[in-house]
Image (cartoon, grey):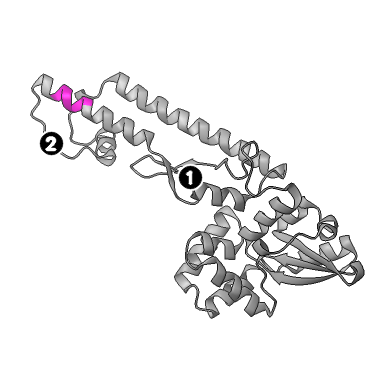
């Protein structure tokens, strides 16, 4: 279904071919809807993307932040279904025979067909951004304006150790969360420099970057005697703990998604706003 949306966004000149390939690669690796990924990557603003999809599909665009919720419409669609498919029931009209439904991806025909069978009503589509839909779901079904402190949707962001020399931890959106490995390495480098001075070593000085320190560990030209077994043990222990934490968080994340506590798109947005 993403190809229709991609074609609409390209024709609207909101993204170019390079940005499209980047968004598709992100989608293949992490999932999510193409339009939302384009917005998250800041290739195009949310209102322009939503407007382009509405025009491309010849459907009305709705601002869910400005409409009142229709309880009868909400009762027609289960919250788990609405959240899983990024849809929101806006209104039930024509004596309960027509359901106006906001969708982030109106090209997803199987979702419309499934909902039509479940509700046994005619469905009319309007377009809204995924962010607005998820926000409306919280307000309409849960009575929340924001995620409550007790249930912070998207607060658990799976992390992974990247393969770069900095050893940083990044979230799924590529934003750096923790640099503790680098900090530990730099501290170890400072201790090594102090040890060299104490021993009278005349080793060439160079910048204390994580990359240089790791090069030393892997057989660079810096004096090997500057690294104590305690330093190396602390480095290995810190990395083991980070890898263990990443596995635990990923397992918790997968469990929460399977239980319907939040959707992958929600925690990606939340992770993007982490300090």
> Of marks 2 and 1, which one's residue comes earlier in the chain?
2
Is residue 172 visible in the rendered structure shown here?
Answer: no
Q: Position of residue 215 (x, y in %)?
A: 26, 38
Q: Please tell me which residue lies in front, 115 or 233.
A: 115
Tell me whether the residue at label 2 lies in contact with that at label 1, contact meaning CB atoms closer than 8 angstroms. no
Give the crowd class for mark 2: few <14, some 14-19, many >=20 residues within 10 Å. Answer: few
Q: Residue at x 69, y 43 (%)?
A: 261
Q: Position of residue 57 (x, y in %)?
A: 67, 78
Residue at which label 2 appears? 205
Q: Which mark is residue 274?
A: 1
Decide if residue 128 is in sight here. Answer: yes
Q: CA distance from mark 2 to mark 1?
A: 37 Å
Percent of width and height locating residue 252: 62, 36
Magenta segment? 191-196
Determine which quarter of the picture holds residue 229: top left
Q: Look at the image and tell me in which quarter the N terminus lies.
A: bottom right
User: What residue lies at 29% left-to-right and 36% top-to-bottom?
Assistant: 214
């Amino acid at each position: 279904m993403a190809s229709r949306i991609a074609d609409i966004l390209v024709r609207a000149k909101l993204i170019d071919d390079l940005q499209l390939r980047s968004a598709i690669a992100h989608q293949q690796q992490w999932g999510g809807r193409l339009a939302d990924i384009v917005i998250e990557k800041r290739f195009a603003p949310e209102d322009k993307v939503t407007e382009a999809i509405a025009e491309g599909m010849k459907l009305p665009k709705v601002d869910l932040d400005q409409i009142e919720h229709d309880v009868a419409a909400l009762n027609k669609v289960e919250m788990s279904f609405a959240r899983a498919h990024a849809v929101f029931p806006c209104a039930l009209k024509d004596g309960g025979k027509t359901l106006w439904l906001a969708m982030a991806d109106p090209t997803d025909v199987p979702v419309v067909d499934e909902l039509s069978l479940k509700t046994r009503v005619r469905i009319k589509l309007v377009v809204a951004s995924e962010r607005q839909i998820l926000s409306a779901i919280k307000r309409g079904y849960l009575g929340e304006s924001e995620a409550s402190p007790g249930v912070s949707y998207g607060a658990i962001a799976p992390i992974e150790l990247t393969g770069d020399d900095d050893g940083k931890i990044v979230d799924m959106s590529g934003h750096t969360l923790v640099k503790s490995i680098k900090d530990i390495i730099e501290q170890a480098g400072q201790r090594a420099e102090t040890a060299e001075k104490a021993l009278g070593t005349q080793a060439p000085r160079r910048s204390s970057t994580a990359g240089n320190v790791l090069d030393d560990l892997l057989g660079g030209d810096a004096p090997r005697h500057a690294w104590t077994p305690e330093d190396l043990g602390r480095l290995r222990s810190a990395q083991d703990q980070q890898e263990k934490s990443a596995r635990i968080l990923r397992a918790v994340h997968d469990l929460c998604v399977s239980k319907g506590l939040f959707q992958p798109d929600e925690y990606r947005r939340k992770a993007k706003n982490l300090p």
